[in-house]
Image: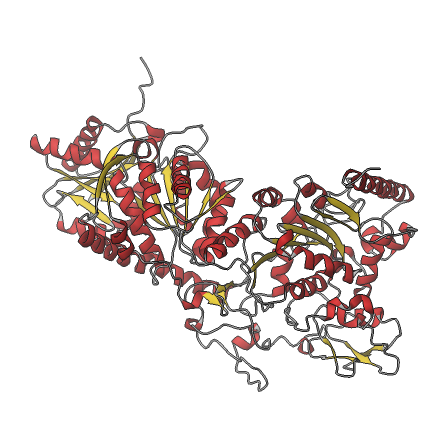
Amino acid sequence: MIEKYKELFECKEEFLLPSGRACPGCGGGIMTRLWTKATGGKNVVFGGIGSCGTSTTGMFPIGNMTRIPAIAALLGSNGPTLSGMREALNIRGMQDATVMALDGDGGAADIGFGAYSAMVERGHKVAVCVNDNEGYSATGGQRSGLTSLKAWTRTTHKGKDRPPKHLPFLLMAQDIPYTATANIGYPDDMYRKMKKALDQKNQPSLIQVLCPCIPNWKYEPRKVVEVSRLATETGMYPLYEYEKGSFRRTVFIKKKKPLQEYLKLQGRFDHVTEEDIKEMQAYIDALDRKIDGYIRMYSVEIF
Amino acid sequence: MKAVICKTWEELTKEVKRENWEHSYRPETWEDLCQVGPRSYPCMGEPAGSDAADFTMQEFVPVFNKELCTKCGTCYVFCHLGLIYEEEDGYFNSRTDYCRSCGVCAYECKSGAIEMVRKYK
Amino acid sequence: MEEISYMRGNQAAGLGAKLARIEVMGAYPIPPSSEVMEQIRTYIDKGELKCGYVETEGEKSSHLVTYGAAISGVRAFNATSGQGIAYMMEGLHLQSGTRVPAVIAVANRTLFAPHGMHPDHQDTVSARDTGWIQFHCESVQEILDTIIQAFKVAEHEEVMLPAFVCYDGYYLSHSLEKVTIPDQKEVDDFLPMYHPGENSYVGPNGLPMSTAGPMYDPWMTEFRYIAYMALNQNAKRVINEVDDEFGKKFGRKYGGLIDSYLTEDAEVLLVTTGSNTATARFTTDIMRRNGKKIGVIKIRVFRPYPREALCELLEKSKARVIIVLDRSPFGAYTDEAMAALYNLKDKPLVKGFICGQCGRDITPYNMIDMATQGFDIARKGYVDQPVEFYFLRKKEG
């Protein structure tokens, strides 16, 4: 296999069974499969699977499409459940068991944000992977705090008029040991970040992965990876990581592609006008400057 | 307590015999459910039922062309069901029983070695 | 060696948890029960208890810590009041539905609005359909003993349901009473280490088992039935058994589901829950000295409601009138008593007084007055108003 995918071939076992209920063209499915591979599958337990996790893992008694035991908690309550499980497993002498969770963007940034903030402040050794499909996908596609600017959702028919939140920036302010954004279009980068997040030295950690969602983004199923890659190449979704006080971009885009290439593949941007595109371009530039600012702020030495 | 492993709803209500399942278990009555409560074992064997071939989701399946294959592994990375596997000689192939015809493997293959072929007429 | 000491209700709750050797505690402060978590912290810092202590940002989260720990196979504890129970409501259903045992000590406190801090039972009454077992305590000694008994009941393999141990907010949590502290070795003998059973673990390491995914009717009904039978059949039996065993070992019995005081020859019975039982016993003695025969029924366990035990008691007694002292704002205790007695052949008349709201005192004079109204009802033969607010202030002049 090619050099950059060598790490992905280390674990040959599949932990996500094929008879789940994910749509063909689901970005979240690719992410979940690689996340479970990154854990190694031994001595690991899910503390929460998020709403899309429950639909991909299927209804009872077909359920449990992962070979890893999964405790499904409520929406927005992964934070304390993970803390409780970590304490309990430590008391039972299982300090090296991995406690991790999958979550959605609504469950992490909206309803469960307070709980995650407290979990990071307590400092328990847990890892969270956030499936960012830019909306409440499992309930039908309503907008969430992470929906893109000018995107159609079931509750923003004319396009969302506010830019999204950035979960890693919010947690960086709390000095979380490791946080990053990732993209299924760059699986080698994503896998490396997952492995780092699951290393106990870097925990508590949270990574946010862009996973296109076919019923709400409205693209052709076979183009899921291309859509995801274009989100980064146009600058809408920059990839960076923050590790214990040092911040860096992990994928450098020397010349950004025109935004129209990303928008025309998706049905949710059909209504976008020239003015909207100017606004989105201004948002991309502002985000760029913000990230440059963070790089300067977190540089170890300033010459 | 017996393990309750994945079943389709249809199979719970009618007699079905399948030979090639490792942990084939069918709850005969509801008393076979986990008596502690809604708990279940993660599925350790083959998943029972839900062949996509029985559903209308499967229309095309991938066919691999060894002459064009460069053994890059991109198809293996992007199949979200994990159906593509590496053979001994380094070429790739897939099991098609659970394929959902998304077509990502064929679209991402740079050398055009995968073709989506219509399975049923 | 048994020790005799004096302590507040909150301290007794903390001590009960320490004797039961809890392993994880989720905590969030709320008056009047914040002293329990401070007490546990003191024990951990002194090295007397080895326990994981997780302070969270809200009661919903602190309950989920208890849930996550209990489902991973350790003994878990929590302590809260009033608004905390209301905030935890989502998680309470989750825990009783997956049948994961734990104990939460509740210092009953009224719910907002109107903004109050003093005790009434509105918080645990609002949580009566969550599927949790609810114990109510009459004295500080009973708090200490009930916490130990509650762990044994909750972790019993036929029950496997979480439990509340409730006591009145400032009346019991903050008043000093004499307490006999049982010996740690005896408690270890009575309550061994928590083992959820082989069926709750997965793999050679013993990671917790998965919870089932979403399901629809054919399986939901069966799981609901399993939980219902555990609560309404097995729990009733096990509570009585555990109380008997506790009585034989430590010398203190609390009657199981129901305790009664001089009910056989009484004409009017007072049905009480919580700390006003002690006042009712005192009132019974006074009235009997003056020739009026009344008795007391103490509902020690509110969920599962002791229907069969109550009917059995009333068949043996010759009382024709029951007065329910109701500390919930909309008459829940009266409703439950009336429903439990509905199918009796010779049912007595039931009248409920809503009293004691937000800590308003129920004095012996009030109880004498209520019992006298009970005698009037017995003479008239019918009940005018089945539920009435007691001791409102006068409207005019």
Within the image, what quadrant is residue C119 found in? Answer: top left
Asked if residue C369 shows in the view, the reply is yes
Outermost residue toward the top in this view:
C397
Q: Quick check: C50 left or right of C55? A: left
At 40% from the left and 60% from the top, the residue drawn is: C227
Rendered position, B97 above or below A179: below
Q: Where is residue B81 drawn, in percent x and y?
A: 70, 70
Rendered position, A164 above or below A5: above
Q: Where is residue A182 drawn, in percent x and y?
A: 75, 54
Colour pattern of the rendering: secondary structure
- Near-viewer residue (B32 or C290): B32
Q: Where is residue A243 drawn, in percent x and y?
A: 71, 48
Asked if residue C338 shows in the view, the reply is no
Outermost residue toward the bottom in this view:
B19
Q: Quick check: C368 left or right of C152? A: left
- Near-viewer residue (C285 or C339): C285
Q: Quick check: A185 left or right of A44? A: right
Within the image, what quadrant is residue B99 found in? Answer: bottom right
At 57% from the left and 82% from the top, the residue drawn is: B21
Q: Quick check: C188 left or right of C38? A: left
Q: Where is residue A299 drawn, in percent x and y?
A: 78, 41
Rendered position, C51 above or below C271: below
